[in-house]
Each structure stands twice: as C-alpha cells, then as structure tokens.
Image: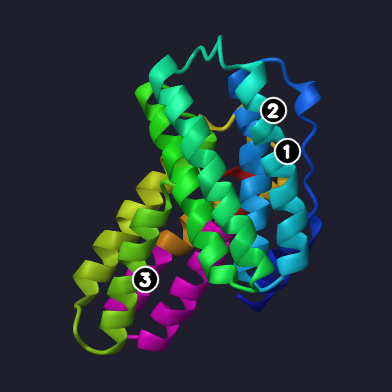
Amino acid sequence: MLHRAIILALLLWAGCGSRINAAETSDPAGTMQTVMASLRAAASYARTGNLALAQVELGDAKGAWDGWLGSFSDRPAPYPSSAWQSLLIAGKDNLARANDALHAGDGSGATSEILALRRSIRELRREAGRFELNDCVFDLAAPMEQLRSAAVRFGEAKAGAEEVKAVGVALRDHLQRCNGLASPEIASEAEFRRLMDGAISSAGEIGSAAAAGDAGLVHRYQIELQSFVNLLDFRFG
C-alpha cells in the first residue's frame, strides 16, 4: 500500500501543468474538452492550497471560455442552442467568482465555483446525449462519497460490513464502466492502467477488510480509493 501511495504522488506531480490553446480546436465539443482539463487542474490546485497555480489554470480556462462567446455562438452543435447560450453566460459568472475567490485566498470557494461549472457542463453534455470517459469519471464522486461515509461509520461501529461491501461493489462497478469507456489509446496508457486497476482492486478488497472487522484497514482502503478517484478526475475527468 505504501508503494501505491508513492506512485500516486508521482502521478500527481507528473500530471501538473496542462495548458489551453483554444485556437487548436475548431468545434465547441473540442474546446469544451480543453477547458475542462484546465478546470480540473485549477480545482485540484485550489483544493490543495496551490493558489498561484490555480490562478494560472483558471486564467487559461477563462481565456478559452470568453473565446466561445464569439466563436461558437451561432453553431453550438452538438449542444442545444438555448442551453449552450445559458451555459456560456452562467459559466462566465462562475469563472469570475472563482477568480475573485482565488485572489482573496479562498481556495475552498474557488473549488466550489469550479465544481458548479463542471457540473453544468456535465448536464449540458447529458442533454446532448453525450457520455464519455470524462463524464463517467466525474460521476465517480457520488459512489466515492457513499463509500467514504460507510467507511467512517464502520469505524464508529455505526455501519455493518455488508454496507461497506455493497458500496465498495457499487464503486467498483462504476469504475469498470469507466474503464470500458476509455479509448484504446487511453486504456493502454500506463498511468491510466495503474490508477484504474488499483482503484478497481481496492474497491473490491475493502469489503473483505470490513468482513474481517479490520476498521483500520477499511480506513486505509478508503483513503487510498479517494486518492485514486481524485487522480482519475485530475487526469481524465
């Protein structure tokens, strides 16, 4: 488990520093992917207190977002036109508030605004009938929170082993779905395989730890799984 933690730390360091060049994309879906990459990085930096780096990433996202207004206002396909326009307007507000929060040293506030924008983007993609790897990874937050809650309550003797096992299986099933959505290129990447295979394995093992009554091991698996999910989101969400 210590070996895994070291790998996770190295992956987080190696994954830093994505940058946006909106001119390289020629459609709203492509531009959205590049913006989302910088939003993920900005949120990760803000969450861990690296506010200067968060400002750089947020600046990249804001620059590309502002470019959308003129570039794709009259051709939003594959997204519904009215929903696209609403997202562009609301997104500018989210980005402005996130930027203000970063300047005020409020990493938590900035993270909340970025999450709200990412959620709006996710809903727009859902409305357009799109569901890809990054959507699936973004949706990992819900089953991960259910597992975290069950693990904490198990440690307090307020939840049984069967509940921990059930939420672990649910998380594993979601991870396997995401794994199946990865393109052949991504699926073969060493980084993706370490994160995905490690998370799937730990999600399956946490139930056994609970059945053995080992609250400490359940807690360690929960922490490890949170790290896996955070890194999957950072790199592929």
Q: Position of residue 14 (x, y in %)?
A: 80, 57
Horizontal side of 49 relative to 216 (left or right) equals right
Q: Amino acid at mark 2?
A: Gly
Question: Is 26 rendered above or below residue 197?
Answer: above
Q: CB under 8 Å between callouts 1 and 2?
A: yes
Q: Position of residue 116 (x, y in %)?
A: 45, 50
Mark 2 nearby-residue class (10 Å; few <14, some 14–19, many ≥20):
some
In this rendered view, identify the residue nearer to me: 193 or 47. Answer: 47
Question: Which numbered marker is on residue 67?
Answer: 2
Horizontal side of 189 relative to 90 (left or right) equals right
Q: Is residue 219 magenta?
A: yes
Determine which residue is flagged by label 1. Answer: 63
Q: Position of residue 148 (x, y in %)?
A: 36, 71
Q: CB under 8 Å between callouts 1 and 3?
A: no
The N terminus lies in quadrant = bottom right
Q: Position of residue 51 (x, y in %)?
A: 71, 68
In this rendered view, identify the residue nearer to me: 200 or 13. Answer: 13
Q: Earlier in the sequence, mark 3 or mark 2?
A: 2
Question: Which numbered marker is on residue 148?
Answer: 3
Mark 1 residue element: helix
Q: Earlier in the sequence, mark 1 or mark 3?
A: 1
Which stretch is magenta? 204-233
Mark 1 nearby-residue class (10 Å; few <14, some 14–19, many ≥20):
some
